[in-house]
Image (cartoon, grey):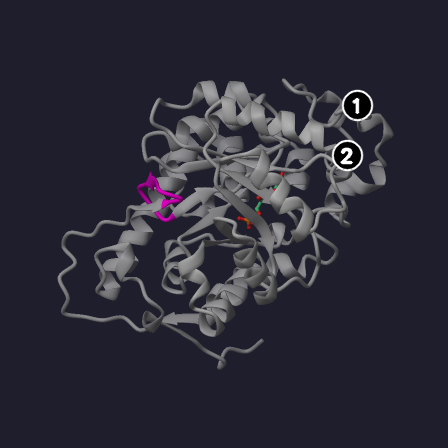
Amino acid sequence: PPLNRIISLADMEASSHKTLSYKAWAYYCSAADDEITLQENARAFNRFFFRARVMRPVFRCDPSTKILGFETSLPIFVSGAALAKLGHPLGEVNITRGCAPSKIIQMVSSNASLSYSEIAAAAAPSQTLFFQLYKHKDDDVALQRIQEVEHLGYKAIFLTVDAIVPSNRERDVRSPWVLDDQENGHKFFIDGEGAADADPGLGIAGALIANDDRDMTWEKTIPWLRKVTKLPIVIKGIQCVEDALLAAEAGVDGILISNHGGRQLEYALPPLEVLYRLRKRHPEVFNKLEVYIDGGARRGTDIVKAACLGATAVGLGRPFLYAQGAYGEAGVRKIISILEREIITAMQLMGVSRIAELTPDLVERVDWLPV
Ligand code: FNR
């Protein structure tokens, strides 16, 4: 359908399903085992309702905010996801260009299908990019990668910790193996060994993370990272309250509560529920670091709910892959404008005109929904 017929992120996903190759669709949408966590990530948002306030001036509503001090027009960002070129020849650059006008921050995956420099070169001068790091098992190789992206002007390191081994993603495994066709600037799936050594039974992810560090610890890895970079450090893949507290103790700048969009540990809790528990039991943590969530957010109301519960911003993964796959850069601009309208409408109907006014008293978790 023409782009003006797309009025929701669900429309975009449906359109993308029709456009993308079988393999691209399978890789993008797949999740672990029976995809229970995938579904529950999204369904968790349905358990939270608003306690809207009325008779408050909302004519001027401003949904802009800051992430790690960097401006963004909305409390959202692009969660780094691999291989955008599977969906569209311009790949990650579609996302970079599509985010530029609205100052939405793109987190670029370690397994991007374009080189980090090509992506950086596509960014507008004032545009912010973050870098998602899969730490190589060899510290020196990892260090080189960090120095490269620092030099290219990436502004933060999101260290992914929830994908130390590949999981079982059956849609991806069942679809044909096409990694060998992928071209890219930095041979991400090779790093010495390569796709040839990877087990096709593990799907694409098995090859992508084959050389990553499986022995990361709080004691060793975070001080190492602190030593080698001055960039803000965010831990991506926190899945429970206890680890959020350990991250705060470790002195990182932020945590992204995430289960990799349901693609890693099946039956990991939905990030929104983890956020809710963290905010209830340890509100002090939110003063020590920034907290973000990702997984299953598809509506402006989802983002507003997370913001009420203390999230500085919400990441979206698949929606950006689908949008760029189906419509390139214009698709990316489109989903951002849809989310903008939805976020502003929700804020106004809640009696709120600034992101800072989104507080926990504006949402209520309900238990009267059938499970
Ligand atoms: C991902 N994700 C991911 N995460 C990461 O740290 N490094 C990566 O390379 C990838 N690659 C990747 C590929 C694809 C196709 C998907 C769908 C996801 C996880 C991603 O950053 C994010 O956590 C989830 O996508 C968020 O869930 P939603 O918004 O897709 O539901």
Q: Residues under labels 2 and 1: Cα distance?
A: 9 Å
Residue 104 x %, y %: 38, 38
Total number of numbered discs in the rendering: 2
Q: Is residue 81 visible?
A: no
Depth check, front residue: 288 or 131: 288
Residue kind at label 2, given as amino acid type: Asn
The residue closer to the viewer here, 177 or 250, is: 250
**Part of the protein shown in magenta:** 67-75
Q: Is residue 43 above or below residue 371?
A: above
Quarter of the figure with the N terminus = top left
Task: In the rendered view, tell whether residue 331 sits above or below residue 52.
Answer: above
Do the CB atoms of the residues marked 2 and 1 lie less than 8 Å apart? yes
Q: Is residue 172 left or right of residue 98?
A: right
Which class describes the residues within 10 Å of circle 2: few (<14), some (14-19), or many (20+)?
Answer: many
**Which disc, if any, is residue 211?**
2
- Asked which quadrant contains residue 209, the reply is top right
Q: First in sequence: mark 2 or mark 1? A: 1
Please say whether residue 261 is one of the residues in the magenta stretch: no
Residue corresponding to mark 1: 192
Identify the secondary structure beneath mark 1.
loop
Q: Residue at x 28, y 57 (%)?
A: 356
Q: Residue 232: in sight, yes or no?
A: yes
Above or below, 69 against 117 in this view is below
Q: Element under label 2?
A: loop
Magenta stretch containing residue 73, yes or no? yes
Q: Residue furthest bottom?
A: 368
> Is residue 61 rendered to the left or right of residue 238?
left
